[in-house]
Amino acid sequence: MPRFLARVGSFSARHRLLITAAWLVILGFLTTVAVTSMNTGESTVSIPDTEASQTLSVVEEEFPSLVDGESETKTLQLVLQAPGDAKVTDPAMASDIAEILVEARALPNVESVSNPLDPAQPYISEDQTTAVAVLTFTGVTDANQEHLHDEVLDLAESASADFRAEVGGHLSAEEIPEFGIGELVGVGVAFLVLLLTFGSLVAAGANLLISFAGVGVGVVGILAYSAISPIEATTISLATMLGLAVGIDYSLFILTRFRTELREGRTVEDAIGRASGTAGTSVVFAGLTVIIALVGLSVTGISTIRDMGFAAAFAVLVAVLMALTLLPVLMRTMGRRVLPRRERHSRATRVPSTRAPQPFLERWARFLTRHPIVSVLATVLVIGVVAAPMLTMRTATSIPGGADPNDTERRAYDLIVDEFGGVQSPLLVLVQGEGVSGRVDSVRNMVEDLEGVRMVLPGPVTDQDDAALVTVIPDGSPIDEATSTLVNEIRGHADSIPGVELEVTGETAIGVDSDTMLHNALIQYLVVIIGLSFVLLVVMFRSLLVPLIATLGYLLSVGASFGASTAVFQWGWLDPIIPAPQGDPMLSVLPIILVGVLFGLAMDYQVFLVSRIQEMHSKGMPPKEAIVSGFTRSAPVLVAAAAIMTAVFAGFASSPMAMAASIALGLVVGVVVDAFLVRMVIMPALLSLLGRSAWWLPRWLQRVLPDLDTEGRSLEEQPAAVPGSDAPATEDPAVEEPVLVGAR
């Protein structure tokens, strides 16, 4: 692979116009398709069959009148709560409500307005403090839906002088927030890290340019694909975030090696080839691990998550291809300007490999090798504290009433739950058997005796008297644990009444089943990822213990990510700082996404750090000296890469969109823990404890496993080219080392 990638890099450098034109043609074609045919608002979410969804299909067959014909009308709820000790049935309050209803009927496109005080069909709470009027609209279009909703909001505001007034429901799909200043700040910090790392504005700019180009091609490619298979607008959020982060990092790794080769006296073209062959091989391996993990998100069986994983995998693939082809074009164009000014006019035939390491990094590495047990125990304790909130983590497939607790729609939903129970999301109990009409009362009595039930209402019975529906109003909302327990308890009594069987369905039951399904999928996915991680690392490092340590460290990083996400988005610890909604259970898909993405990033850091330690050990260094030597050469690049990832993800964590912010924050914590604690503390310390046994591998396995040559040993056989036309006119044998980035 190193030889092949070296040829790819050299070819790209020699044919700059061809490679640039090829990428421009690809970008132009994808942009044309995206602009003319993209579809980001009409995707159909599909999930695997669950017990509740299968029961719903039976209900639709047995009671077609309940589902026949989709109404073109839309509704909003006007929730009015009387102040203080007043009741909505008081004459003054009732008169005010009547006036409000008259104003509501006069609003545009309002077909009807229900009267909550109508004795025939009352919609008032038991304590008579709250009333709910339902506004039915016709002729709602994309052009007028926002205006109509604003009219109702204005009505509620005018009513707020006498009532607490909230507007529930919505006439249109939830608006997707645009990226804001936080994302730009994150990119700015990433650029600053690159500038400090390279000491060259040209190199930092080239690195960022490649990442932006990769994100651009990736995003328009995803949008172009939507012309074939519609996607949701949120699908590109993970792709943008991850594509930008890995695009910067992958270019950073190759550019760092390119600068190293220049300092060792190679020509620009030779340095490009060797950088593409060595660092490029690691980039390919790292990119493949991320892609495999993202594609593996399809294990959930949910189309939205599958599309999100595929989209992000495509963005990562584009980032890898950009780093291998377009980056060499820029490296050839920049030449020695990629180096700091003080080094551009210096040339050396070879920098001695015994260069003095970074003082701080050397001291840190030696401390870890001298005190490995204390280092490991202290670090595990810190990670354990961060991960502890994970024990209380709750998840939900969706947040009823909207994700923002401060929005009037959510306040209306919660107010109705408090006063009326789960009437907005009832449970449907399907009763099947012969002569069910005579057993409905028994079913009703049994369900009423269960904890968490507000009300049980009998429903329709089939003409054959073999199926009936019973509506159950729970005390709480669909995301309450008590509601989930109630669903399971009803199923537990499925055979308690002779002659009939009970099954539970409805939106709430489907959500409960989907959440359980995603929990099981997470376990399966985690097992697959752990197994894949171990196998890939065994092939990579030709060792059994090193992959074992790496995998256990990855689990620590995942735990810390889960714990921090729980503390912030479920407990609301950073509510004043992070604008995204907090205080609800986390979305069920979040843990799976974090597991997949962190797997890829953790393997990146593992490869770029430990491969250098392995290289030093293979050259005959004692284990502890190999750790110190490899660590001081690779850790600076790892620090820069992790800092960039953290900055980019932290920018996205400021998004008001709950999904993007929760993913980003989880990745921020996961990256910090994995890079700075697991890879830069635990890994060197445990390698020091294991000594030579860390690299042990059975002989039979040595013969079976392929040799990836990720460090490009085959390229070492090629002598450095004598500097030619691209060498500077003024020669100086002294070569200064970079301030931050280590090199061989």
Image (tube, grey):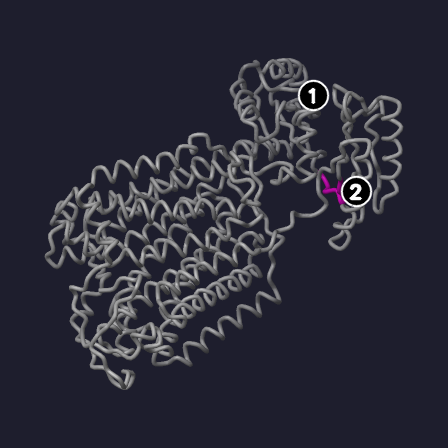
Q: Is residue 425 visible?
A: yes
Label 1 or label 2, whichever comes before in sequence order: 2
Q: Secondary structure at mark 2?
A: helix
Q: What count of labels does the image hold?
A: 2
Quarter occupied by residue 299: top left
Which residue type carries mark 2? Val
Q: Quadrant of the N terminus?
A: bottom left
Answer left or right for 139 relative to 293: right
Q: In x, y percent, where is residue 148?
A: 79, 47
Using a 10 Å C-alpha cutoff, classify the residue at mark 1 as few (fewer than 14 neighbours), some (14 to 19) or many (20 or more). Answer: some
The residue pinned by badge 1 equals 458
Relative to 148, is 383 above or below? above
Say which of 72 and 663 sits in front.
Answer: 663
Quarter occupied by residue 378: top left
Q: What secondary structure characterizes most of the magenta part?
A: loop
Region of the chain picked out in magenta, as a range? 68-75
Q: In x, y percent, where is residue 557?
A: 36, 42
Q: Quadrant of the C terminus?
A: bottom left
Q: In x, y percent, where is residue 570?
A: 52, 35
Quarter occupied by residue 274: bottom left
Relative to 516, is 294 above or below? below
Q: Say if mark 1 contacts mark 2, CB within 8 Å.
A: no
Q: Residue at 61% of width from left, 58% of height from top?
A: 39
The residue pinned by badge 2 equals 152
Q: In x, y percent, where is residue 273?
A: 28, 73
Answer left or right for 375 relative to 556: left
Q: Secondary structure at mark 1?
A: strand
Relative to 533, is 428 above or below? above
Give the Cα distance between marks 1 and 2: 34 Å
Answer left or right for 106 relative to 363: right
